[in-house]
Each structure stands twice: as C-alpha cells, then as structure tokens.
Image: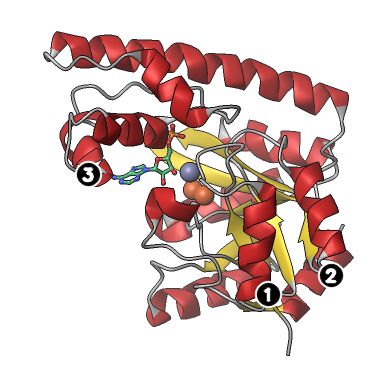
Amino acid sequence: MKFADLHLHTSFSDGTYTPEELVLQAKECGLAAIAVVDHDTVAGVEFTIEIAKSEAIEAISGIELTAEHNGLEIHILGYLVDYKNKELIERLDSLKRNRIERIYKIASKLKAMGINLDPQAVFDIAIQGTVGRLHIARAMVKEGLVGSTSEAFSKYIGDRCPAYVCGFRFSPYEAIKLIKEVGGIPVLAHPYSLNHDELIPAFVDYGLMGLEVYYPEHTNSMVNSYLGLAKKYNLLVTGGSDCHGDAKHEVKIGSIKIPYELVEKLKAAK
Ligand code: AMP
Ligand code: ZN
Ligand code: FE
Ligand code: FE
C-alpha cells in the first residue's frame, strides 16, 4: 500500500526544511507522494519535484492561499497548479512584497508595546521564503523576547492580539478562481479551523473541488462528518500533516498518511 502527505511547507515559506531535506524526510517515513503547499508561493515547487524524482518519490505542485470571508480566515489549497504560469508568479510577487511590508508594521506595533524587534532579524530567518508570523515568532525566540513561538502568538501576534496585523487576503471566490485559472484543483484546507461548514456549498458554487478531510487536528468524528460533506457535494478528499519542519516540530511529516488512491483521484480530476 502506498501513502501520501499532501500538506507540507518548505523554507520557501515558513517551513524549515529545504526541498532536499523535505524529500529525504519523506523518504525516511516511507511516503510515495508529497505535495508542497507553501503560503502564497510556488517558488519551491520545481526544486522539490526535481529532487523527489531522483529519490523515486512523486512530488506534486501546490500552494496555500489565505482568504477571508466576514472576518474568518480561510486557507485554500491549490493542487497541480501550473507553477510556471507568468501571471501567477507576478501575482504572487506582489503578495511577497505585501508580506515584507507587514513585518515592518508588526515590528512597529511591537515597538509601541516596548518590544524591540529588528525587522532584519525576521528577514534573516526567512531567508528567501515568503515571510510571515511564524518567522516573527522564531525571531522573537532567538532574540530572547519570548520563551517560545506559542508565547509570541498568544501574547503578541496571534489573531486579535495587540501586535497583530492582517496581511493581504483574497476573497474565497478570488482564491478559488486564481487556482482554477492556472489549472489547479482548489481544496478547502483544515475545515475545522474555519468551523463554518455552512459556507462550503457557496465555495462549491465558486468552483471548490475538494476538502482536506485528513488533518492532525481532525478528530474521528470530524473526519466522518467531512467525508459525508465530500460525498454530498461530490468533492475530492485530501489530507496532510501541515508539517513546518522544526518551526512546528510537534507536527511531523507523515503524521497524516493518506492512501495513494486519493492522489490518483486528484490527478484524474485535472
Ligand atoms: P501568516 O500567513 O503570516 O499570517 O502566518 C500563518 C502561519 O502562522 C501559519 O503557519 C500558521 O499555522 C501559524 N500560526 C497562526 N496562529 C498560530 C498560533 N497560535 N500558534 C502557532 N502558529 C500559528
Ligand atoms: Zn505556515
Ligand atoms: Fe493553513
Ligand atoms: Fe499549511
């Protein structure tokens, strides 16, 4: 039996594994297929696919876009996107610049709270990746400003915390449309975190094609309930660990392993 983990981040966003490390880890835990779904970027996809090939692992392209509806944060995964599409890359470049601006804004909010965090310390951690709150949290730990990344989120940069700054967010419609325009399959990520299943039919009308049913935080009853919704709305079923390498070391690659058959269904739907 072959297995896949379809929700992985690399150092091209806020994961710590380079594509090489990711592929080696995937091999170590016996995965037949992986998908890279970095936040707002496809920059790590080509490397990962190439390296995976040499290790006899199948890597498929992907992305995780941040959307919002009525103040609710919604993550939309896009599988099998054309990661070489020029318009997509241009659009994502503008999101990358937006994320850099946001780091300065968060740093100045922190400063107003008496916390001095040099934005450069954050960029040094992100290196080439699309920069975000997990990099801020890691920089704060490194600079001794908090004891842990979770403390950074709970005291300062988590949603509704004093140094929180909202980044660019698509509407769910725009995110789904963009993914479809570049040949991708839009899938609702970790539906438990949205916790508003009643919105799913509208997303299906916009073109949503799948649900991330298997996810570390999903209980058995959630899995069953999402399987029911997938059946009801004729949606593909996906799953993955959302591993960020050592940035969230409690979430390990392969902690969710889905049957390879689900990858075949995904590819067949393209
Ligand atoms: P951003 O896209 O910059 O808003 O950052 C999103 C990243 O922060 C994702 O990797 C989330 O999983 C992570 N994140 C959001 N809230 C928390 C939290 N309370 N604790 C740890 N990580 C979080
Ligand atoms: Zn992340
Ligand atoms: Fe997510
Ligand atoms: Fe993720």
- Distance between mark 2 and mark 1 Cα atoms: 10 Å
Crowdedness near tag 1: few (<14), some (14–19) or many (≥20) residues, C-alpha within 10 Å:
many
Q: Judge by depth and name the residue closer to the eye, 82 or 180.
A: 82
Q: Is mark 2 on a helix, strand or loop?
A: loop
Quadrant assignment for the N terminus: bottom right
Q: Which of marks 3 and 1 is nearer the N terminus?
A: 1
Mark 3 surroundings: few (<14), some (14-19) or many (≥20) residues within 10 A: some
Residue 266 falls left or right of residue 168: right
Residue 142 x, y percent position in the rendering: 29, 33
Q: Residue at (19%, 31%) from the top-left corner? A: 144
Q: Decide which of 37, 183 is in the foreground and name it.
A: 37
Quarter holding residue 170: top right
According to the picture, the residue beneath numbered tag 2 turns out to be 56
Q: Residues within 10 Å of mark 2 (few under 14, many from 20)?
A: few
- Quick check: can you spot residue 233? no
**Residue assigned mark 1:** 31
Q: What element carries label 1?
A: loop
User: Looking at the picture, which amino acid does disc 2 mark?
Assistant: Ala
Work out how far the residue at label 2 is from the one at label 3, CA to CA, in angstroms.
37 Å
Q: Nearest the camera: 242 or 144? A: 144
Which label's residue is closer to the chain start, 2 or 3? 2
Q: What residue type is labelled 1?
A: Leu
The mark lying in front, picked from 2 and 1, is: 2
Residue positioned 34% across, 36% down in the render:
138
Q: What residue type is labelled 3?
A: Ser
From the image, tell me which residue sits under label 3: 148
Q: Is mark 2 within 8 Å of ligand 4?
A: no
Q: Does 76 appear above or below 92?
A: below
Q: Where is residue 224 in the image (x, y as percent from the top left)?
A: 48, 80
Q: Quadrant of the C terminus?
A: bottom right
Seen from this angle, which residue lies furthest left? 114
